[in-house]
Image: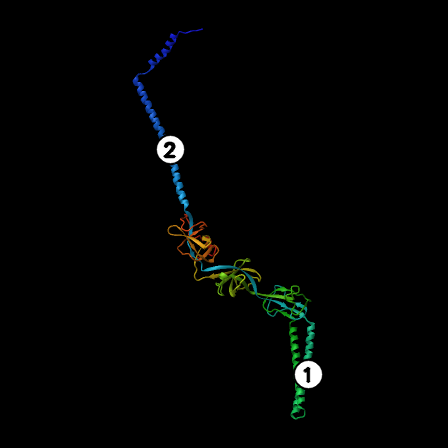
């Protein structure tokens, strides 16, 4: 076992201390070193502080700017952004478009006036006929026999009247010489008068049968077009037929006059007072795109239909070229004019409130003012304002149902005064 002396341990522990004391610098060099360290620490603290201030400024300044921008944006959004339109004079003439039914100027159903068999027909459907032109002939043997019998009866009555007349004349001569009695002479005169009446009746019967025989020829009552033919050679027809009965109408021909046509339209009550015989009107059809058919208002019923609340109006149109066909559908354009047109605004500017139709306008302080108005004529995308609107008002377009009276609003940048697209939809008139 290795043992050491305690005194040696003390000497060994004291030797490093001596070496340390010998290694320490002088007192002046130690103080300068501490000053330099303090300066370094001070610079370091200042640098750290500046860096913290810079970082703090870099984070706070953008946030402050963002808050300012957000506050400005919120302030802007609190004001309602609107677009305005300027009221314009409404057009003096309005094109009222109505559906119309084209009818012939005249049409007639041709029936047989005498009974018999169809001997021949001369006009088929689509044929243009003239007044008095023969359409068909009817063979009437029974009627011919009746006419011959009536003529024979007329001849008999004529002979009886001649004999009775001469007898009465002789008796009146003998009465002058008192050769016969007055009563006998009067009897012969009365007999002659009766024979004359019988002769006249026979003559009337012959004239009636001659008229019926004349109806063997079925003729056209006016210039027109044959639209229906219901006859065949050998077919039995009866006098007058049975008009109104669908199973056996008895109609031989149907003729329509098409060189001039009638068009009937029903004008709404609001526009009825503007339709007069001098109102300009024209027709359009789908068969002829872009073509206008000049027409004229001929007459009206001068009364409102209590069921449809419309005025029945007849419009006449010349159809010399035969372009329009009876029974067709046409669009009737009535140019309704007014002497005192009001202002018009888009329909999008209207507000329908419980108290009536309202529009929103901006005053001089950009505040909303709600005006109650009354609507006049309707142009589709535009309406005429009869009352409640001035030409200098700035009307808010598409105001929204939540807009309130006195609300602050702001006009959108680049807001147009009056769109021209919608105006072109009703003729571009202002």
Image vertical order of residue 79 relative to residue 343, above or below: above
Image vertical order of residue 386 relative to residue 400, above or below: below
Q: Which residue in the protein does label 2 denote?
A: 56
Image side of residue 128 versus residue 2, left or right = right
Element assignment for label 2: helix
Q: Is residue 170 visible?
A: no
Q: Can you tell which quarter of the image residue 21 is in?
A: top left
Image vertical order of residue 108 relative to residue 46, above or below: below
Q: Residues within 10 Å of mark 2 (few under 14, many from 20)?
A: few
Residue farthest toward the left in the current orientation of the protein: 28
Name the foreground residue: 330 vs 71. 71
How far across and down, in percent of the image, does residue 193 sit? 65, 84
Residue farthest toward the bottom in the current orientation of the protein: 177
- Looking at the rendering, in which quadrant would you find the N terminus? top left
- Looking at the rendering, in which quadrant would you find the C terminus? bottom left
Name the foreground residue: 394 vs 321. 394
How far across and down, in percent of the image, does residue 82 sit? 42, 49
How far across and down, in percent of the image, does residue 222 sit? 59, 68
How far across and down, in percent of the image, does residue 373 sit? 44, 56
- Depth check, mark 1 against mark 2: the one in front is 2
Q: Are marks 1 and 2 in contact (CB under 8 Å)?
A: no
Residue at x 48% of width, y 61% of height: 336
Q: Can you tell which quarter of the image residue 176 is in?
A: bottom right
């Amino acid at each position: 076992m290795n043992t050491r002396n305690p005194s040696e341990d003390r000497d060994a522990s004291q030797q490093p201390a001596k070496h340390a004391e010998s290694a320490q610098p002088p007192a002046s060099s130690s103080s300068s070193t501490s000053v330099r360290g303090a300066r370094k620490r001070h610079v370091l603290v200042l640098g750290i502080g500046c860096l913290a201030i810079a970082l703090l400024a870099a984070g706070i300044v953008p946030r402050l700017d963002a808050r300012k921008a957000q506050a400005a944006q919120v302030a802007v959004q609190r004001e309602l952004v609107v677009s305005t339109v300027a009221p314009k004079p409404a057009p003096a003439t309005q094109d009222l478009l109505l559906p119309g039914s084209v009818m012939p100027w005249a049409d007639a159903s041709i029936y047989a006036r005498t009974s018999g068999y169809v001997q021949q027909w001369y006009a088929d459907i689509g044929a243009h006929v003239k007044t008095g032109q023969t359409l068909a002939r009817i063979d009437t043997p029974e009627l011919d026999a009746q006419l011959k019998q009536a003529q024979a009866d007329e001849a008999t009555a004529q002979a009886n009247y001649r004999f009775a007349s001469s007898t009465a004349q002789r008796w009146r001569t003998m009465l002058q010489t008192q050769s016969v009695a007055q009563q006998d002479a009067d009897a012969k005169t009365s007999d002659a008068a009766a024979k004359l009446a019988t002769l006249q009746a026979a003559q009337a019967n012959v004239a009636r049968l001659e008229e019926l025989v004349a109806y063997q020829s079925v003729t056209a009552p006016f210039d027109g077009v044959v639209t229906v033919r219901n006859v065949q050679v050998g077919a039995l027809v009866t006098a007058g037929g049975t008009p109104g009965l669908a199973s056996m109408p008895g109609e031989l021909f149907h003729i329509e006059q098409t060189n001039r046509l009638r068009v009937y339209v029903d004008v709404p009550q609001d526009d009825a007072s503007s339709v007069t015989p001098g109102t300009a009107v024209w027709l359009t059809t789908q068969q002829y795109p872009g073509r206008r058919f000049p027409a004229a208002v001929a007459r009206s019923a001068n009364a409102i239909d209590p069921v449809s609340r419309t005025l029945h109006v007849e419009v006449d149109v010349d159809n010399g070229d035969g372009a329009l066909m009876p029974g067709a559908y046409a669009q009737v354009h009535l140019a309704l004019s007014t002497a005192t047109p009001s202002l018009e605004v888009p329909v999008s500017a209207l507000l329908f409130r419980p108290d009536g139709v309202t529009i929103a306008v901006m005053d001089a302080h950009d505040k909303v003012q709600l005006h109650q108005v009354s609507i006049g004529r309707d142009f589709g995308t535009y309406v005429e304002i009869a009352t409640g609107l001035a030409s200098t008002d700035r009307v808010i377009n598409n105001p929204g149902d939540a807009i309130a009276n006195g609300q602050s609003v702001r006009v959108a940048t680049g807001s147009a005064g009056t769109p021209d697209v919608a105006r072109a939809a009703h003729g571009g008139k202002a």
